[in-house]
Amino acid sequence: MKKIIVGATGASGMPILEECLRIIRSEKEYESALIMSQSGVMTLEHETNCTKEAIEELADEVFLPDQIGAGPASGSYRTYGMLIVPCSMKTAAGICSGYTDNLILRAADVTIKEQRPLVLAARETPLSPIHLRNLTELSKIPGVRIIPPMLTFYHRPKTVDDMVHHIAAKLLEPFGIETEGYRRWEGI
């Protein structure tokens, strides 16, 4: 089984988190381990009709951010990599500086040291020079991908849900997940 650690922080974008967890759940070879920050829970309740309990039901395992001694804090915990969706600039800064005071940050640090894929759905606008510096430094690390949840239109979305699905599929693509309904650019 290919386990993806899914971190969720307090930035905007919780419908994308929900869709990512639904897609992972639908894949027979994959499972998810969710770590959601307190800010993430607040944002989830503000942006969606989903409760913390409902989002946790979409995950195969759930850890609290203060469980610093849990499995994802160790390189011997088998994972296929980590996705942080949404990824706040605070979290990006923590990862960039190696500051690992919670399980999301520690799991990201372990993912980098074990050279597993780390995908960050960096969520902020406008981006300050500090944000850009941190994201640039992170992008230089092998295996780290910065994939901001940007709107695209080449796949001709009809609804917001179509757009959410498209970006969720794009975030999961580095883990080898090919989602139904995901349309790649095929040229003009």
Image (tube, rainbow, N blue to C red):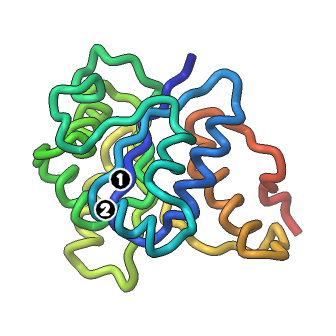
Quarter of the image holding residue 44?
bottom left
How far apart in space, not on screen, are marks 2 and 1 (Cα)? 6 Å
Task: Count the labels in the image.
Answer: 2
x and y, in percent, of residue 25 in the image: 64, 35
Could you tell me which residue is drawn at 44 percent across and 45 percent down? 83
Quarter of the image holding residue 24?
top right
> For the residue marked with disc 2, what is the amino acid?
Leu
Foreground residue, 177 or 20?
Answer: 20
- Quarter of the image with the N terminus is top right
Could you tell me which residue is drawn at 17 percent across and 44 percent down? 102
> For the residue marked with disc 1, what is the amino acid?
Ser
x and y, in percent, of residue 73 in the image: 22, 28
Up-down relation of residue 99 to residue 50 (above or below):
above
Could you tell me which residue is drawn at 30 percent across and 61 percent down? 136
Q: Are marks 2 and 1 in contact (CB under 8 Å)?
A: yes
Tell me, for residue 139, which label it has, or none. 1
x and y, in percent, of residue 113 in the image: 24, 29
Q: Residue furthest right?
A: 188
Element class at badge 1: helix
Foreground residue, 66 or 181?
Answer: 66
Could you tell me which residue is drawn at 34 percent across and 59 percent down? 9
x and y, in percent, of residue 16 in the image: 57, 60
Up-down relation of residue 163 to residue 173 (above or below):
below
**Taking 103 as reference, is 4 left or right?**
right
Residue wearing tag 2: 135
